Image (spheres, rainbow, N blue to C red):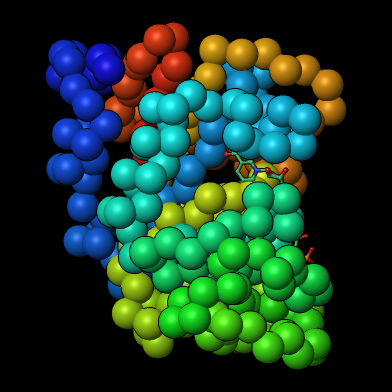
Amino acid sequence: MRRLIPDPGQTTVSEQLEAYRPWEEARGERPLVGMNFAATVDGRATIDGRSGPIGSKTDTEMLVGLRKRFEAVMIGAGTMRVERYGPMEPLMVLVSGRLDLPWDAPLFSKAGEEVVVFTASEAEPPETAATVEVVRHEGAVNLREALGYLRRERGIRALLSEGGPHLHAQMQADGLVDDLFLTIAPKLSGGGAPRIVEGSLPGVAGLELAWLLEEDGELFARYRRP
Ligand SMILES: NC(=O)c1ccc[n+]([C@@H]2O[C@H](COP(=O)([O-])OP(=O)(O)OC[C@H]3O[C@@H](n4cnc5c(N)ncnc54)[C@H](OP(=O)(O)O)[C@@H]3O)[C@@H](O)[C@H]2O)c1
């Protein structure tokens, strides 16, 4: 893979991520937040309803590598319903309005696994092999408060969100995304598939390009919120 910005030259996913130390940059009362998306050139976040067909093997390698640099991974209920996550090393965090989650997914099936679910629902989760902590907010999940809770109660210094587009829009609107990792696959998909931000923002958010990598026409960007 080539690094185009900064310091052009050859690199690898692991070499590039080695120097990235988000846990050293907790934002006081909340963790540093990274957001990861893979998109087509037309900004679409899904092909046939899934994110899998967008990126290459290197994109998967980047995602797996990024997870190792963060202490928690957060996703919205919509992404969990479609992608049915399994257990992973960082603490898994879900955001759900209705608590309508795929409770038979691999994530909930592993004894000893811990999951934190922020929800606006009064419903009780079913018994699962994984230990599920439910944190309730009124009306909707206040994402800034949820991040504060993870920092305070779980000691999380760096959290990677993997979307989806609706959760992403709210986190951007609330100014809660510090680093946006965006893979742009050399593909056009068209149609009505969601884009990486689905929801309005209070204004146009300017971003700084912190790095840009390329392999086989696929671009791996890291944007920073100034
Ligand atoms: N290309 C990529 O990198 C990528 C990444 C992630 C996802 N995706 C794709 O995106 C699609 C899912 O998109 P999506 O936008 O529907 O999913 P999403 O953002 O993961 O989930 C939306 C859901 O999250 C819950 N939620 C979000 N903010 C909330 C808040 N403040 N309070 C309470 N609940 C909140 C709600 O859950 P309830 O429904 O429970 O109320 C809402 O319906 C999937 O097809 C997935 O494959 C692509």
Q: In which quadrant of the rendered view does residue 216 lie?
A: top left
Q: In which quadrant of the rendered view does residue 204 lie?
A: top right
Query: At 61% from the left edge and 22% from the top edge, which residue is drawn?
Result: 40
The image position of residue 120, as x and y in percent, is 74, 79
Give left or right: position of 148 versus 47: left
Query: What count of labels does the image hold?
Result: 0
Name the one closer to the observer, 102 or 44: 102
Query: At 70% from the left edge and 62% from the top edge, which residue is drawn?
Result: 77
Q: Is residue 215 visible?
A: yes
Name the one closer to the observer, 19 or 215: 215
In the rendered image, the quadrant that contains the C terminus is: top left
Give left or right: position of 189 versus 25: right
Q: Is residue 140 visible?
A: no
Residue located farthest toward the top when viewing the structure as drawn: 217
Relative height, residue 92 to residue 189 (above, below): below
In the rendered image, the quadrant that contains the N terminus is: top left
Relative height, residue 142 to residue 86 (above, below): below
The image position of residue 161, as x and y in percent, is 50, 55
Q: In which quadrant of the rendered view does residue 72 lie?
A: bottom left
Give left or right: position of 113 versus 101: left
Query: At 58% from the left edge and 73% from the top edge, which residue is drawn?
Result: 109
Relative height, residue 214 to residue 192 (above, below): above
Give left or right: position of 192 versus 5: right
Relative height, residue 90 to residue 63 (above, below): below
The image position of residue 2, as x and y in percent, is 25, 15
Query: At 66% from the left edge and 18% from the top edge, which residue is drawn?
Result: 42
Q: Quadrant of ligand 1?
A: bottom right
The image position of residue 122, as x and y in percent, is 79, 89
